[in-house]
Amino acid sequence: MSKLAESSLSTPPPEPSQSGNGSSDFDIVRTYHHLLHTDPLLTMPIAAIESLILLLSHSPPSTISETLSLLSHHSSILKFSVRNPIALSAGTDLFQRYIVSTLQSSPSYNNRNASGEDFRAVRDHLLTSGRLFSQRAKEARGIIARTARKFVKDGGTVLTAGRSRVVAAVLDAAADEGVKFRVIYIQSGIHGAASRNREMVRRLREKRIPVAVIKLTAVAYSLGETTMMMVGAEGVVENGGIISPMGTYQLAMLAKSAGKPLYVVAESHKFVRLYPLGQYDLPIRQTVLDFRESLENDDGARDGKEQGDQENDDTVDYTPPELIAALVTEVGVHTPSAVSEELIKIWY
């Protein structure tokens, strides 16, 4: 399965077969990056979904077949434009499934080449439904915060890392309700992430939450003061595991060995149809292990630094379900084994 997924993510998309759709001058990649740049709170899946909605509104009425082809083609362009398209793919795939479901309820669906006034009404309905879908996805973060905040107890200490907007919303919600807790925040070693680390810590302290900032090397030492660990996810896979920024897997292993529960907070639009068997079964290419024999440029071949000193912002790892205590989405609290049932509800 992963080989097929990797092939679809690494092969340039073919040109769509429709003609006269008016979308040839619409730059889906530029639109996607513009949305992310103008709204820092926007996630990659939502930015991808809103880009597809803008594509539909930009393109003149055509037929149902051409519309589905248009969405599929531009979704492939988006996936091909980024090094790690897992989170983006979750959004585009789910949105396309939602569009198909919406079309199936339309009287014109059985006539897939319906055109003219019939399809104009269908297209208007698609745009309205698409915007509603996007709005509900944006509201998911607040719903999760209200649910997951119950895991944050008075006198507890939460260990977290990364820049998850959902984790930040959960901690904010707990603080706003007067819960007295502490946070241990693991400082990222990713190049250029220092300012984002400071922003996360600043926000928490503004809420009068005591925060201790530690390095990754101090995690095991700090677990004795930890009540629980909470992280976000770029993708939730079919077996209940998660795909998250590099380092999450080792944090989960340490938490498990110390008997500390790991809670994952993620929106359901990050559920992705993947079933990885291990770290090297993800449908993306990553340069994490950079073995070398050459003695040339001994002090580091890339700008004086080895790969291990210069982590990429988009490298990820896979955390298996047995290391996760529970996943919290806008639908509720799930055990990892229940994720497959949720995916069936979404996709079938």
Image: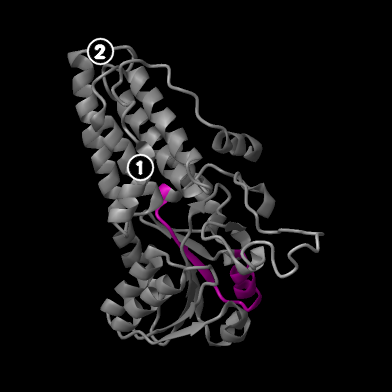
Magenta residues, start to end: 249-269
> Where residue 336 sits in the image (x, y, percent)?
54, 56
SS state under label 1: helix
Q: In this view, does 311 lie above or below 339?
A: below
Give neighbour class at mark 2: few <14, some 14-19, many 20+ (Cα, 10 Å): some
**Farthest front residue in view:** 297
Q: Give me the residue at 31% from left, 79% from top.
A: 175
According to the picture, the residue beneath numbered tag 1 turns out to be 30
Residue 278, visible in the rendered structure: no
According to the picture, the residue beneath numbered tag 2 turns out to be 115
Q: Give me the residue at 46% from left, 22% from top.
A: 15
Front-most of 5 and 276?
A: 5
Q: Quadrant of residue 145?
A: bottom left
User: Where, quadrant-wise, is the N terminus in this rendering?
Assistant: top right
> Where residue 32 sits in the image (x, y, percent)?
35, 44
Give the residue type that dot 1 points to. Arg
Q: In this view, does 286 lie to the left or right of 195?
A: right
Residue 223, visible in the rendered structure: yes
Give the residue type that dot 2 points to. Ser
Q: How is the image coloured?
A: one colour
